[in-house]
């Protein structure tokens, strides 16, 4: 393998019908690992998980417990990791897999940060979850050259919903390409 590619995509807790359309698009992508956010214990999300499993993809889809969550699907060999259990609070919002790569294992974590509005309750929920994530990440043992197989490198991917419009300035070349 000469390179490794990832796609983080908010699937928006699709209906089964919409999930079928998303599946057609996602399965046709070239990325090795898909990190899908805004999942739920719903028919649409289960359709995606089952279809990827049936096609031979490794699927990590922790039960979102009534809340939103994250799913990771990998077309390359991977082992699901119960990273959400380490977080403890809103565990379904974190999915993780360890990819077995020639240069040593790589831990891929997909995180779906809680948000809705800037109310004090929602802000506290977000802070509590982020603190729990920070603690879980910090608790991971250090990686040394002698122990690569036991302590993988880490590649986090987080979906952080934006609560207010943000002005983004594109590079001139990018702007021309999308006109």
Image (cartoon, helix red, strand yellow):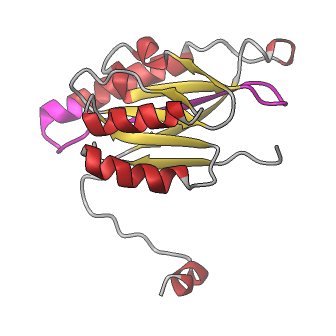
Residue 150 placement, left or right of 62: right
Residue 112: percent from left, percent from top:
38, 36
Residue 156 placement, left or right of 66: right
Residue 47: percent from left, percent from top:
36, 36
Residue in front for this viewpoint, 117 or 37? 37
- In reply to whether residue 111 is colored magenta, the answer given is yes
Residue at image position (23%, 28%) is 67
Q: Quadrant of the N terminus?
A: top right
Residue in front for this viewpoint, 117 or 51? 51
Residue 176: percent from left, percent from top:
54, 87
Q: Residue furthest front?
A: 54
Residue at image position (13%, 39%) is 119
Query: Where on the picture, by quarter, is residue 76?
Result: top right
Residue in front for this viewpoint, 3 or 120? 3
Magenta residues span 100-124
Q: Is residue 86 visible?
A: yes
Q: Is residue 111 visible?
A: no
Query: Where on the picture, by quarter, is residue 33?
Result: top right
Residue 50: percent from left, percent from top:
43, 31
- In reply to whether residue 81 is colored magenta, the answer given is no
Residue at image position (46%, 74%) is 169
């Amino acid at each position: 393998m000469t390179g490794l590619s990832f796609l983080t995509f908010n699937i928006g807790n699709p209906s089964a019908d919409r999930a079928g359309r998303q599946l057609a698009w996602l399965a046709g992508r070239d990325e090795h690992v898909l990190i899908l956010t805004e999942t739920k214990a719903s028919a649409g999300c289960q359709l995606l998980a089952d279809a990827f499993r049936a096609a031979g993809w490794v699927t990590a889809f922790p039960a979102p417990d009534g809340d939103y969550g994250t799913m990771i699907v990998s077309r390359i060999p991977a082992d699901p990791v119960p990273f959400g259990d380490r977080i403890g609070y809103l565990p379904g919002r974190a999915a993780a897999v360890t990819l077995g790569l020639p240069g040593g294992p790589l831990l891929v974590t997909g995180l779906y940060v809680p948000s809705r509005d800037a109310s004090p309750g929602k802000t506290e929920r977000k802070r509590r979850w982020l603190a729990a994530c920070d603690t879980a990440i910090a608790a991971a043992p250090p990686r040394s050259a002698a122990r690569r197989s036991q302590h993988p490198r880490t590649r986090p991917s987080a979906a952080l919903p934006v609560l207010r419009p943000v002005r983004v300035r594109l590079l001139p070349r990018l702007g021309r390409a999308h006109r």
